[in-house]
Amino acid sequence: MKKKLFYIKVILILMSFFSCKRNDTNYNSIVNDWKIDSIGCTGLRNPNLANKLIRENKLEGGNVNDFEIIFGKPNEIRENLFEKTYVYYFNCGCLNNKKIENSDKCYAEFYFINSNFKSVGFICE
């Protein structure tokens, strides 16, 4: 009986290990989708993906360094005395995988106060 319980425990541990591995691969793919679409031309970046990355990484209230690890370098940074805003483009007008100047674009604005993530807004113009 003890031997049977031992094997069951080993099987459960192995199952949890392999299920985590699959999720890690999928997760890394999701993070890479955001980073790969650095100027918003390929359609990989979108508000749903941004919200998913925030939620799954528990970034709400987290620091700016943890945020950058997940989202990568922003397209723009805007700063004033109290707030820092990271801007990431998505759904931009593009030609040959380059953003067309003065074309329609959408962007996500991620707001930080005292280097802690507070909120996000999505704008199209």
Image (tube, grey):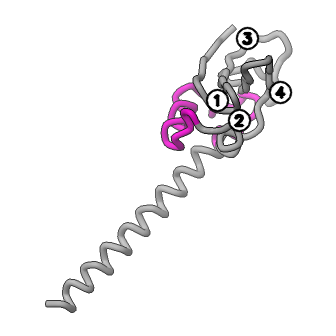
Instruction: Give the labeled residue for mark 2.
Output: 37
The residues bearing labels 1 and 2 have C-alpha atoms spaced at a distance of 7 Å
First-in-chain label (1 vs 2): 2
In the rendered image, residue 71, in percent from the top left (x then y), is placed at 67, 39
Instruction: Give the labeled residue for mark 4.
Output: 98
Identity of the residue drawn at 41% across and 63% down: 19
Q: Amino acid at mark 4?
A: Lys
Q: Nearer the viewer, residue 79 or 5?
A: 79
The residues bearing labels 2 and 4 have C-alpha atoms spaced at a distance of 11 Å
Q: Residues within 10 Å of mark 2 (few under 14, many from 20)?
A: some
First-in-chain label (3 vs 1): 1
Which quarter of the rendering shows the N terminus?
bottom left
First-in-chain label (1 vs 4): 1
Q: Residues within 10 Å of mark 3 (few under 14, many from 20)?
A: few
Q: Residues within 10 Å of mark 1 (few under 14, many from 20)?
A: few
Q: Nearer the viewer, residue 72 or 81?
A: 81
> Which range is magenta?
33-61
Instruction: Give the labeled residue for mark 3.
Output: 104
First-in-chain label (3 vs 2): 2
First-in-chain label (2 vs 4): 2
Is residue 47 one of those drawn in magenta?
A: yes
> Left or right: where does residue 2 sit relative to residue 74?
left
Instruction: Give the labeled residue for mark 1.
Output: 43
The residues bearing labels 1 and 4 have C-alpha atoms spaced at a distance of 13 Å
In the rendered image, residue 113, in percent from the top left (x then y), is placed at 67, 25
Q: Amino acid at mark 1?
A: Gly
